[in-house]
Image (cartoon, rainbow, N blue to C red):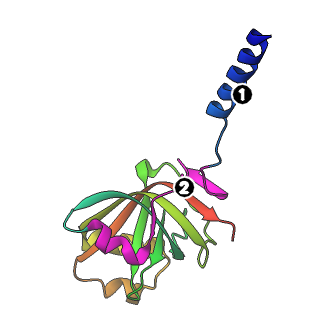
């Protein structure tokens, strides 16, 4: 009888230990997805980055724009009225082109960077900006960019 109880207890312990705990966000997942915990909002990025040039973090925010050629980048709104450029690690996945206005959680690296005029013009072309808007890009831009290894489009 002791062996049966001990075996049953061991089975229950093993089942609990190996059970999936549902730590991923619910919604459509891209790349590596995003596990719950340690998520900040876009208004906390600057503080979280501190004096670091690059830092691993999870961020939630609202998408303002997606590359209309392939979905190869997106922008998230920042509280100061600006946006944060988000690209995807190793060009491994793309976002739906109709994602603007939806909330997402991203996991990856925020980095202080200077984006060249050439790259800014390329991104503007991919975003279907007009020739006049592209011609106005004449200076590099110092900004925080994000390389996402995983994205989840939140359901609510």
Viewer-closest of 2 and 87: 2
Quadrant the C terminus occupies: bottom right
Q: Is residue 27 left or right of residue 75?
A: right
Q: Is residue 99 above or below residue 1?
A: below
Q: Quadrant of the N terminus?
A: top right
Which residue sits at x=60%, y=79%?
A: 101
Name the residue beneath numbered marker 2: 36
Q: Nearer the viewer, residue 72 or 107?
A: 107
Q: Position of residue 148 (x, y in %)?
A: 44, 57
Q: Are marks 1 and 2 in contact (CB under 8 Å)?
A: no
Is residue 30 toward the left or the right of residue 53 in the image?
right
- Which label is found at residue 121? none
Q: Quadrant of residue 141?
A: bottom left
Whether residue 50 sits left or right of residue 56 in the image: it is left
Query: Measuring 55% from the left and 51% from the top, which residue is drawn there?
Result: 33
Looking at the rendered image, the disc whose residue lies closer to the viewer, 1 or 2, is 1
Q: Position of residue 144 (x, y in %)?
A: 31, 71
> In the rendered image, which quarter is residue 52 located in?
bottom left
Determine the residue positioned at 56% across, 67% down.
Answer: 104
Which residue in the rendered view is the most extreme toward the left? 51
Highlighted magenta segment, given as a residue range = 23-49
Residue 12: mark: 1
When the figure is inspected, residue 133 is found, relative to residue 126, above or below; the finding is: below
First along the sequence among labels 1 and 2:
1
| Residue 59 % position (x, y) | 45, 66
Considering depth in this image, is 79 or 118 the residue closer to the camera?
79
Residue 80 point in image, percent of width and height: 38, 88
Density class for disc 2 (Cα within 10 Å; few <14, some 14-19, many ≥20) is: few
């Amino acid at each position: 009888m002791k062996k049966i109880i001990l075996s049953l207890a061991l089975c229950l312990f093993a089942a609990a230990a190996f059970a999936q705990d549902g730590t991923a966000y619910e919604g459509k997942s891209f790349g590596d997805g995003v596990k719950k915990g340690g998520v900040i909002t876009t208004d906390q990025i600057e503080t979280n980055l501190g004096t670091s040039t690059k830092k691993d973090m999870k961020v939630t925010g609202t998408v303002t724009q997606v590359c209309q050629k392939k979905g190869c980048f997106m922008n998230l709104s920042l509280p100061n009225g600006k946006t944060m450029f988000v690209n995807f690690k190793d060009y491994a996945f793309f976002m739906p082109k109709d994602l603007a206005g939806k909330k997402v959680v991203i996991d990856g690296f925020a980095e202080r960077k200077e984006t060249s005029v050439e790259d800014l013009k390329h991104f503007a072309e991919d975003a279907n900006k007009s020739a006049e808007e592209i011609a106005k890009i004449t200076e590099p831009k110092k900004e925080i960019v994000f390389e996402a290894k995983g994205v989840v489009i939140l359901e609510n």
